[in-house]
Image (tube, rainbow, N blue to C red):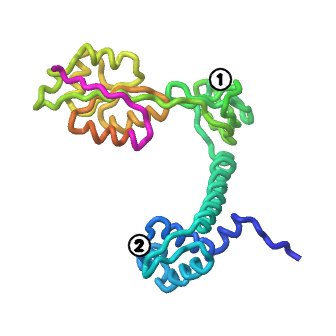
Amino acid sequence: MTETRTDPLSTLLRSKRVITRLQILVEIAEHQPAVRQQEIAQKMGVTPQAVSEYIRELVDEGMVAAHGRGRYSVTRSGIEWIQSQAETLEAYARHIRRDVIQQVATWTAIAAVDLREGDQVGVYMKDGFLYASREPRSAMGTVVRDSRAGEDVGVTRLSGLIDHSEGCVRVCKVPRIERGGSRRIQKDRLRDLIRDVGMVAAVGVEGYIALEQVGRKPDMFFGAREGVIEAAFHGISSAILIVDEEFTDFLKRLEGAGLSYTLHDLTAP
């Protein structure tokens, strides 16, 4: 006789009814107290009658409270049930990311020394690049084929966290040509700001020329915004000169990416 499966994840993923109840509860919680069953039905691809029936069941079970026509709220019991299902899904997602994807994914690194297939290696970030060496690190993996020092090497079965810190972005505001352009930039301050960063970028010809005037050709001009953000994710600090009308939008992108930055207005008085 086959044993009945009681695993919560199996129940959640295999039962359309349970998934539908969860979705409806989440929709009610998100839009309470004014709940539009027609919109929920369209979003989920079911009939309004089906949504109405599910809500009626949830009310009967005490997971939803009714407050008159079209007005509902999720009860404490309903919130606790949502929480338990969410925790089950989160655990499953963690398992996929940490135990499944990490096992089958192949990461590309630079071989710090000669490596052979099957070697256990430490993986770490240096100057924006991923390296693999025989020294133990916080992240360890297995070499997939022989590689000489300096070559690209595949590493699989990566476990642990790659030890690195994100770079900081120095956002330098420069005036548009109508307000003086490169002629009105504090050159000495600019030299100080770019002296110790890994990369320098410019958005706008005004910033490009200002950098050339202090003897530094920008590392990035076309696609500079994306390049600076990518560099920061790889641990490289940078300075970006950006014209004033694009300044605010770029700060929003940095904040959306969760990156740290400092602000510098290079406009001369």
The x, y position of residue 130, in whole percent, is 56, 31
Residue type, mark 1 in image: Val
User: Which mark, residue 113?
Assistant: 1
Residue 197 lies, in percent from the top left, at 40, 21
Q: How many marks do you count on the picture?
A: 2
Q: Which residues are magenta?
A: 255-269
Residue 31 belongs to magenta span: no
In the image, what residue occupies the spot 21% across and 38% down?
A: 245
The disc label shown at residue 235, or none? none
Mark 1: which secondary structure? loop
The kind of secondary structure element at disc 2 is: loop
Q: Position of residue 261 (x, y in %)?
A: 39, 31
Mark 2 belongs to which amino acid? Ala
Quickly name the residue at label 2: 34
Quarter residue 146 falls in: top right
User: In this rendering, would 197 be left or right of 166?
Assistant: left
Q: Quadrant of residue 173?
A: top left
Q: CA distance from mark 1 to mark 2?
A: 64 Å
Precedes in sequence: disc 1 or disc 2: 2
User: Which residue is found at the position 67% from the left and 40% from the top?
Assistant: 158
The quadrant of the rendering that contains the N terminus is bottom right
Q: Is residue 266 magenta?
A: yes
